[in-house]
């Protein structure tokens, strides 16, 4: 039987991808960011999943304003890194797991979540930067990835509560898959940042860390935080954090099991315009 | 209108909701076209002619020509779409975000290194933070203006 064993949470700032691709990770500006992921690279070597269910948002890449799915699951065999306006990132193509992805889609739709099934999709920095942060620069990604894109671009975006409930449905879906697979679920985006208007550059360290505390110890309460609190306190793009609740909802304690172990926690300001947050939670 | 839009009282912020999206459809789709290298070249060769192929309003076209991102957002642009214009001109996300504050590149970068813009006074319109309308533009541009 397939099982979710751990969840990983990280910001997915495009400038981090550029720093990796241009060989700038040793520069004083970037060093503290990448230092926060040294443990994570070791951890994932020791805890390598067969499949990553990777929750991220598309940044006007695969989805223009022609179609705006709230939840889109990638069921393709592979996904090509997109040209976001300055050429594609020089990273390996992403290999999917169409069988498990289709299984999850079937199960989760039957649990009343209306997913959009996507058989052809390019992936942007939202998906590839987390992979680079955790795996470095391999010639091929060492495991399969199911991309799961959430609309956080056009309002209203899904609520934290709905994301949290969806995570629970995904856990059930994975557990009902017959093959013996080690699955990790990753939630990406955030933390506080605002990329627009005279309020651009907003960072709220205190709010971010209080939210992280709550996400770890009382995720049901974190799920009740309304959109307006994210936008007001963590910036217009800080609302990406609702995606972390999908991963958190898929952990064992939410289904009545033990609380997860915090394997790693990291927070740093700034990476470009953004507060970088990172967590690794292991099911016990 | 009966829709719930509690975010209207946040200073210096435009939330890209269904109403903005409707206004900005063609502007944002023009931005999407810049994901192809050959279109970026055509746009850079003659911006006006390229824009005239799109059913955008004259105001929207002018905002693009001026690289006035605040104006483009007010007219229905979304920052993730508009970022593709910036990328075409070789600008980073930080340069683009900074351009909306009135600060120059060094000022904005220094603010981020100091820990970013403070939330204090910037939660609601009418407080006294640096993102409030009466404190615009910020930085060097603001000092020049006054």
Image (cartoon, coloured by chain):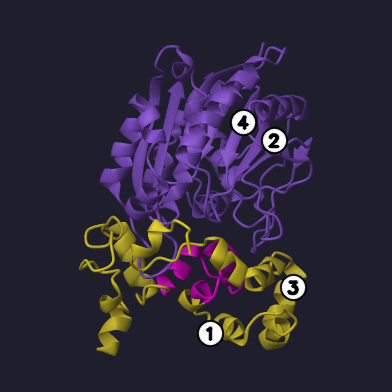
Q: CA distance from mark 4 to mark 2?
A: 17 Å
Which residue is at 51% across, 65% downward? Answer: B92
What color was chain A assigned in the picture?
A: purple
Left/right of residue A105 with respect to residue B130 in the rendered view: right
Q: Quick one: SS at disc 2? A: loop
Quarter of the view holding residue B84: bottom right
Dominant secondary structure of the magenta stretch?
Answer: helix
Q: From the viewer's perspective, is the residue at label 2 or at label 1 nearer?
A: 1
For the magenta stretch, what is the residue range?
B72-99
Left/right of residue A193 with respect to residue A48 in the rendered view: left
Left/right of residue A127 with respect to residue A189 in the rendered view: right
Q: Quick one: SS at disc 3? A: helix
Q: Earlier in the sequence, mark 1 or mark 3?
A: 3
Q: Which residue is mark 4?
A: A53
Which residue is at the front of the view, B101 or A226? A226
**Image: A16 above or below B101:** above
């Amino acid at each position: 039987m397939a099982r979710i064993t751990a969840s990983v949470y990280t910001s997915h700032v495009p400038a981090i991808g550029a720093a990796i691709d241009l060989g700038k990770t040793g520069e004083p500006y970037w060093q503290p960011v990448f230092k926060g992921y040294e443990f994570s690279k070791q951890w994932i070597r020791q805890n390598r999943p067969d499949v990553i269910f990777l929750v991220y948002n598309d940044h006007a890449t695969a989805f223009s304003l022609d179609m705006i799915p709230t939840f889109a699951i990638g069921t393709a065999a592979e996904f090509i890194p997109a040209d976001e306006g300055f050429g594609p990132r020089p990273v390996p193509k992403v290999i999917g797991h169409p069988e498990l992805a289709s299984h999850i889609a079937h199960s989760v739709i039957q649990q009343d979540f209306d997913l959009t099934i996507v058989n052809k999709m390019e992936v942007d920095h939202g998906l590839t930067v987390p992979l680079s942060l955790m795996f470095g620069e391999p010639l091929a990604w060492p495991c399969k990835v199911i991309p799961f894109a959430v609309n956080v671009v056009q309002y209203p975006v899904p609520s934290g509560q709905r994301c949290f409930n969806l995570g629970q449905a995904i856990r059930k879906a994975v557990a009902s898959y017959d093959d013996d697979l080690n699955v990790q679920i990753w939630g990406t985006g955030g933390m506080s940042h605002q990329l627009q208007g005279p309020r651009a550059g907003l960072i709220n360290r205190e709010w971010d860390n209080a939210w992280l505390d709550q996400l770890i110890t009382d995720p049901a309460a974190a799920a009740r935080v309304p959109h307006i609190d994210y936008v007001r306190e963590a910036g217009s793009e800080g609302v990406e954090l609702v995606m972390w609740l999908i991963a958190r909802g898929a952990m064992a304690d939410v289904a009545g099991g033990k609380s997860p172990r915090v394997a790693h926690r990291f927070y740093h300001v700034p990476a470009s315009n953004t507060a970088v947050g990172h967590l690794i939670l292991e099911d016990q | 209108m009966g829709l719930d839009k509690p975010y209207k009282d946040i200073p210096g912020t435009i939330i890209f909701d269904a109403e903005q999206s409707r206004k900005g459809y063609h502007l944002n789709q023009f931005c999407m076209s810049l994901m192809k290298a050959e279109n970026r070249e055509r746009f850079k060769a003659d911006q006006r002619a390229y824009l005239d192929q799109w059913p955008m309003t004259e105001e929207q076209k002018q905002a693009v020509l001026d690289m006035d991102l605040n104006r483009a957002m007010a007219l229905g642009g979304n920052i993730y779409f508009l970022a593709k214009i910036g990328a075409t001109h070789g600008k980073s996300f930080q340069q683009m975000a900074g351009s909306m504050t009135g600060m120059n590149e060094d000022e904005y970068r220094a603010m981020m290194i100091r820990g970013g813009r403070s939330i204090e006074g910037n939660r609601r319109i009418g407080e006294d933070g640096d993102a409030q309308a009466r404190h615009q533009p910020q930085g060097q541009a603001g000092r020049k203006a006054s």
